[in-house]
Amino acid sequence: MKKIIALVMTLSLIFMVGCSSNSAKNTDDILNKDQKEIEKLAKGSTVNFYGWGGNEVLNKWFDTYVIPNMKEKYDISVKRVGMDIDTIMNKLLSEKKLQNDNGNIDVFWLNGENFKSAKDNDLLFGPFTSKIENYEKYVDTKSKDITTDFGTPVDNMESPWGKATFTVFKNGEKVENQITDTKSLKEAIMKNPGKFTYPAPPDFTGSAFVRNIIYDTVGYEKVANLPEDEKQVKEAIQPAIDYLNEIKPYLWNKGKTYPSTIAQLNNMYSDNEVYFSMSYSPNEVKGKIDSGEFNKNTQFISFDKGNISNTHFLAIPKNAKNKAGSMVLINYLTSIDAQASKSNPKNWGDMTILDLNKVPSEDRSKFKSSIDIKNPVPEIKASLVPIIEKIWIEEVANSNE
């Protein structure tokens, strides 16, 4: 009996090692194939795309444009799964701990501290972007906003999908002030008490607003390379914390509470409950203006010292079952037509990551509807973001408790 058990265990071990070797070999094989070979390998398969599902405009564009085109062009079925990035990260970390080599996530949407965490925890497949044909043809692969993600080197472990430029916008009918910096913004807020607020960090857009205030009051160069030390960060950004507390009595609900999400703030703006809102996607805002959801006199605000700009990316988990299909999907999402469709304010309105100088002249007109916010400035290190958010909660949100 013991011999039988030993034999079974030995065969099982050989099988597991064999599977592991085959898995590694399959990964190597994919990275050694060209685009046509990868497409052939992926034909007839299903790709599970995971990403934030809270934007219904984006969801509709993805479901009615991306999914049918992937099926028609490549015979690949794409399943979109709406899931917040924290849950995605926890799922990947759990699967790694359980040594699950057949995860359900094939492609996921991320950037910033989540990319850094995924990279540091060895959760990612790659480097793979050299096999993304449209990335090589149309993206400025040496641009800093492509090669770094919130200060973390990308190292071809994620592929760019879109760009975001933070901007505050106002109802021009209600607010006549010309706003170019934090000083003039403060004057407009005080002149219109109760009509300005921002989402409470760690909401993505609310957190960006706080960082943009830091950039304007302190200067990007003074915070870009700060160490991950709360005391030093707090000391450096104190002028911005003081500013946020100074405007607090003039905010909606006198700053006692803040909207929990950007969607809530946008609803308040639509209903004229506030005269300001903010966005990481100016094209999306233009779409809401054109549709009548936002006031037709909505005006964008560009700070003289710059508005935060960053890139969001797509990555493939190390344990993805369909890496070939994932690469075909990412290549398609980086194509001229998909990027142009995505950037149209009538669709999603997300800004393109393509270098228009590399796009054929006959195709450049497809991007003519995009909004351009001047003076983009890069993001700080991803590791500083949660420190700043913690300081905001303690020094601003809880300052009257």
Image (cartoon, rainbow, N blue to C red):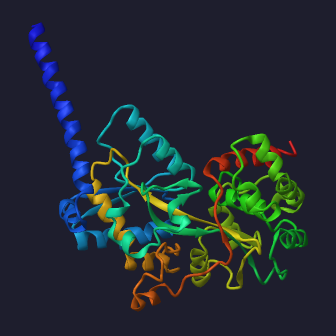
Q: Is residue 6 left or right of residue 174?
A: left
- Vertical side of 397 occupied by 95: above or below: above
Residue 163 as seen in the image, left or right of residue 102: right
Q: Is residue 78 left or right of residue 224?
A: left
Please report the residue visible at 76 percent of the width from the left and 73 percent of the height from the top.
Answer: 303
Residue found at the far front of this picture: 142
| Residue in view at x 55 percent, y 57 percent | 149
Q: Nearer the viewer, residue 175 or 26?
A: 26
Above or below for 346 versus 393: below
Count of numbered badges drawn on the protein? 0
Q: Is residue 239 above or below residue 295?
A: above
Which residue is at the far top? 1
Q: Is residue 171 above or below residue 362?
A: above
Q: Position of residue 47 (x, y in %)?
A: 30, 57
Residue 198 in sight from this viewpoint: no
Residue 48 % position (x, y): 33, 55
Q: Which of the pair 198/342 is nearer the observer?
A: 342
Residue visible at 41% across and 76% down in the picture: 138
From the viewer's perspective, is 199 left or right of 163? right
How far across and how far down the image is residue 222, in percent?
Answer: 77, 57
Residue 304 in sight in this render: yes
Which quarter of the image is occupied by the C terminus?
Answer: top right
Instruction: Name the spot of residue 326 as percent of width and height, x first.
Output: 32, 58
Look at 53% across and 79% down and name the residue there: 345
Q: Quadrant of residue 265?
A: bottom right
Location of the N terminus (image quadrant): top left
